[in-house]
């Protein structure tokens, strides 16, 4: 993704209140390797249950505030974005508030995602070669693409109230 700044990040949230946008902790943007990112995702050190995801969606920077559901999933879950099968990190259930009236009524959408949004790392891992002639690079590219599509589909659903 293209580099973005603090002000654009804060202005991008579609399901956060003005005070939530003001209070959120933006990560050290100079340390981000933007070309390795399909979206920017991070946890808030002040509000431990809260996570943020910012991505370019249909040409507009779109931010989502997500809250980790208190109860951990029963078994080791798979991330619905990167679908990593080796489960190198914790996957948790996030509830994401809908926009508009539904959100004001407290409607949320639940989704299982890597606890610290490690999806961009998982998607870029070299896949284990399955057989002779297996195109590792093509598989890796497909996985990066699939991850981006999954995040976009999710964000679009929140944005459009689907
Ligand atoms: Zn993931």
Image (cartoon, helix red, strand yellow):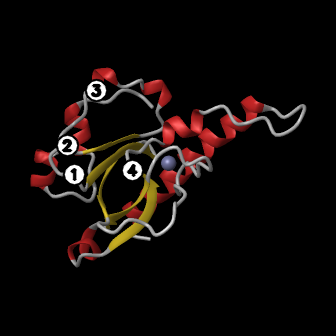
Classify 33 as above or below 146: above
Q: Which residue is mark 3?
A: 29
Q: Which residue is mark 1?
A: 48
Between 34 and 112, the one nearer to me in the picture? 112
> x, y (%) of residue 28?
25, 27
Residue at x 78% of width, y 35% of height: 129
Q: Are marks 1 and 2 in contact (CB under 8 Å)?
A: yes
> x, y (%) of residue 154?
47, 59
Image quarter of the N terminus = top left
Q: Quadrant of residue 32?
A: top left
**Which badge, 2 or 3, is on the more N-terminal residue?**
3
Q: Are marks 4 and 2 in contact (CB under 8 Å)?
A: no
Between 91 and 148, the one nearer to me in the picture? 91
Foreground disc of the pair 2, 3: 2
Dot 1 alpha-carbon crowd within 10 angstroms: few under 14, some 14 to 19, many 20 or more? few
Image quarter of the C terminus = bottom left
Q: Are marks 1 and 3 in contact (CB under 8 Å)?
A: no
> x, y (%) of residue 80?
53, 57
Label 2 element class: loop
**Which badge, 1 or 3, is on the more N-terminal residue?**
3
Distance of label 1 from label 3 (alpha carbons):
20 Å
Q: Which residue is mark 4?
A: 115
Distance of label 4 from label 2 (alpha carbons):
13 Å
In the picture, measured across the screen, residue 67 lies left or right of residue 114, that is: left
Distance of label 1 from label 4 (alpha carbons):
11 Å
**Which badge, 4 or 3, is on the more N-terminal residue?**
3
Distance of label 4 from label 3 (alpha carbons):
20 Å
Between 90 and 110, the one nearer to me in the picture? 90
In the picture, measured across the screen, residue 121 lies left or right of residue 51, that is: right
Q: Which residue is mark 2?
A: 45
Residue at x 52% of width, y 61% of height: 77
Distance of label 1 from label 2 (alpha carbons):
6 Å
């Amino acid at each position: 993704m293209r580099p973005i700044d603090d002000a654009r990040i804060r202005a991008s949230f579609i399901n956060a209140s003005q005070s939530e946008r003001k209070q959120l902790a933006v990560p050290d943007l100079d340390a981000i390797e933007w070309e390795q990112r399909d979206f920017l995702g991070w946890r808030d050190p002040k509000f431990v249950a809260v996570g943020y995801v910012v991505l370019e969606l249909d040409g507009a920077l779109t931010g989502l505030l997500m809250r980790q559901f208190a109860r951990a999933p029963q078994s080791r879950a798979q991330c619905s974005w990167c679908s990593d099968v080796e489960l190198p990190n914790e996957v948790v259930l996030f509830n994401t508030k809908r926009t508009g009236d539904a959100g004001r009524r407290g409607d949320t959408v639940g989704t299982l995602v890597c606890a610290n949004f490690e999806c961009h790392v998982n998607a870029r891992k070299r896949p284990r070669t399955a057989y002779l002639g297996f195109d590792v690079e093509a598989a890796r590219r497909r996985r990066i693409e699939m991850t981006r599509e999954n995040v976009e589909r999710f964000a679009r659903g929140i944005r459009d109230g689907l």
